[in-house]
Image (tube, rainbow, N blue to C red):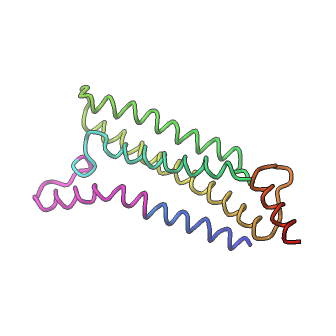
Amino acid sequence: MANELKKIMMEKLERWIIFSVFFALLPFFGNLLIEMSKGHEITLGAVIGSRGELLLVGIALCGVGLGELLGSAASPVSTHPLLTYIFSGMSLAVICLGSLYYASVAAGTEFKPNMVVFISTWGFVVSVFASTGCIVVAAYAEGKHLQQLTTGKIAKDKPSVENEQLVEHEQSQA
């Protein structure tokens, strides 16, 4: 069962990396190709933009991770409370602070472009860490829930609609 749980977690993480992270970063790879084609000097600011665009990607990734985590926290197999608090708190901080920062930069407030690139890059790094944590904790909870459904073990100490439905299903099968 441990290998099955690990497989579920890895599949969810792989899907998230490919369809969320990779596709979200694709426009930046396009910028890199454009800058190379023009013969311009390749700088981090030229590739990721100096107006905080990378931070928007981080905010979106945190939103996806947070949604996955909150969705799995509603399942009968609860997520690990401390990890849920840590990763959801980090994601919320990135979403709130990143949104405020990006709004200030987008409003045309005077910022140094190299500082915007620096802050956006670190905000993105933190967002990848936080959202990856959310995805892993959510995948673990969903994998444990699937194990319970397939083995017929029910978390009796955590009443839920799904547990009641599983009990009814088992009783109808008997």
In the image, farthest residue toward the right: 174
Quarter of the image where the C terminus is located: bottom right
Using the image as rendered, state which of residue 164 and residue 52 is in the foreground.
164
Residue located 80% across and 70% down the image: 151
Left or right: 54 as drawn, with respect to 42: right
Does 36 appear in magenta? yes
- Which secondary structure dominates the residues rendered in magenta? helix
Against 102, is 60 above or below? below
Quarter of the image where the N terminus is located: bottom right
Residue located 28% across and 49% down the image: 48
Against 10, is 99 above or below? above
Q: Position of residue 38 (x, y in %)?
A: 10, 58
Q: Position of residue 30 (x, y in %)?
A: 23, 59
Residue located 30% across and 37% down the image: 116
Against 5, is 113 above or below? above
Against 109, is 31 above or below? below
Using the image as rendered, state which of residue 61 and residue 67 is in the foreground.
67
Extent of the magenta region: 19-45
Residue located 37% across and 39% down the image: 119
Left or right: 82 as drawn, with respect to 61: right
Q: Position of residue 4 (x, y in %)?
A: 68, 73
Does 22 appear in magenta? yes
Using the image as rendered, state which of residue 26 and residue 46 is in the foreground.
26
Q: Position of residue 107 (x, y in %)?
A: 26, 28
